[in-house]
Image (cartoon, rainbow, N blue to C red):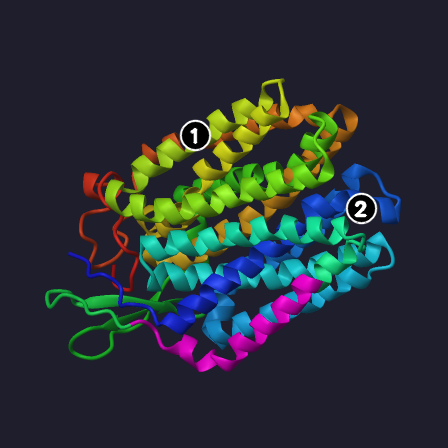
Amino acid sequence: MSTPPARPRASLLLLAYLAFVSLGLPDGLLGVGWPSIRGDFDVPTEAVGWVLTAGTVGYLTSSVLAGFTLARIGVGALLAGSTLLASLALTGYSVSPVLAVLVGCALLLGLGSGAVDSGLNAYAAGAFGPRHMNWLHAFFGLGVAIGPLIMTGVLSTGLAWRWGYGIVAGAQLVLAAAFALTVRAWHRAPAVTAPAVTAQAVTAPTEVGVAVQATAGGPAPTVRVPVRDTLRLPAVWSGTLAFVLYVAIEVSAGLWAFLLLTDGRGLSAALAGGCVSAYWGSLFVGRVVQGLVAERLGAGLVLRVSLAGMAVGAALIAVPGPAVLAVLGLVVVGFAAAPVFPLLTLTTADRVGAKHADRAIGLQIGAAGIGAALVPAGLGVLIGQTSVQVLGSALLALALALLALYEWGARRPTAGPPGPVAAAPAGSEAQTSGPVRPVVDGR
């Protein structure tokens, strides 16, 4: 039976929470700020695709390479450097004279954000249990919920949109300094005591494979896991596509909701900005609440209910009617989506095996970046050619596709045991329907 993870240090846990807040802040700024940005630069609505695509290129690059970078410099140094880069990129946003410069800054922001996201997800998947994993992602939702409030407040006081990005750049700089001061602390892996019958426990990945350390009798040789073996697993690619679809829904709803509520449903800019914050706030509340629920009900049941709830919320947005119906749909989508990203991340080792988990997480986070850019950008083009009313129908189609993909993947055999001390064989009832087992070293 697997043992629970050691209690994480309070200071590192607090920094991890703040880092997820910082990841969400820029995303929350763009949806409310874009109408003003495109007005300043005199570009069409769909030009947001250039910003999103540039950010995705950087995000994808750093996310996929994060698993290898961690082995070279460690998670503390990666977080400090990447957060500093994000601060510099946001400063560039605030002073960009033309759209081309802002697009270049989006590339830098993607590089910094992708490394922070992948690094923290990989660390948390081994160090924290389901409760903290959900709460960490809840704080991402908190960051995105605060972002629209910052931009709405800036615009309401008559200041330029640039001030919103400048404020967030300053917050990122403070966080980078905090990471720099705690670099050594992040190298101390959480102490996990394995059962006496366990011969080995999986530790952090090396540059070329997974290091395996014996808990008795001295260190064991390193197990080499070629990259091609990871890429051959169907579970890796089905999981990657699931992240594309999920994040496409989450980001598209948040990005275009402001335009839907103002141009499509007649709300004022200030009220619509508050409603967008309510959408992201429901994501935050849902992750706080469902972090407890997931431990009791199990990942499989929680994920199924959540994916169905996302489809219901999207249907409410798609139905023509008063603005309150669309706002209700947004809140339902946000609350239902809350546990999907963290639970899919947390259960990666169950689907692909512990030896492939870090690389799979890197691919999944990179794919999330694709979903966060290409699909919302494509929706921008579609909205420009038709009307913003098409948003609800698009969200519904994506939600139904995600639900179908999850059900298809749940019926496939797993990639093997997730680790040498798993409580039950991968794919058993205890793994798929029972309580979520904490992902720890030597799971």
Boundaries of the magenta span: 167-190
Count of numbered badges drawn on the protein: 2
Marks 1 and 2 in Cβ contact (< 8 Å):
no
- Seen at 87% across and 49% down, the residue is 41
Is 77 located above or below residue 342 in the figure? below
Circle 1 crowding by C-alpha within 10 Å: few under 14, some 14–19, many from 20: many
- Image disc number at residue 36: 2
Q: Position of residue 72 (x, y in %)?
A: 49, 75
- Seen at 44% across and 40% down, the residue is 238
Residue 376 visible? The answer is yes
User: Mark 2: which secondary structure?
Assistant: helix
Q: Magenta stretch mostly in which secondary structure? A: helix
Q: Position of residue 147 (x, y in %)?
A: 63, 52
Is 288 located above or below residue 271 in the figure? below
In the rendered image, the residue lying farthest to the top is 320
- Image disc number at residue 309: 1
- Is residue 154 shown left or right of residue 286? right
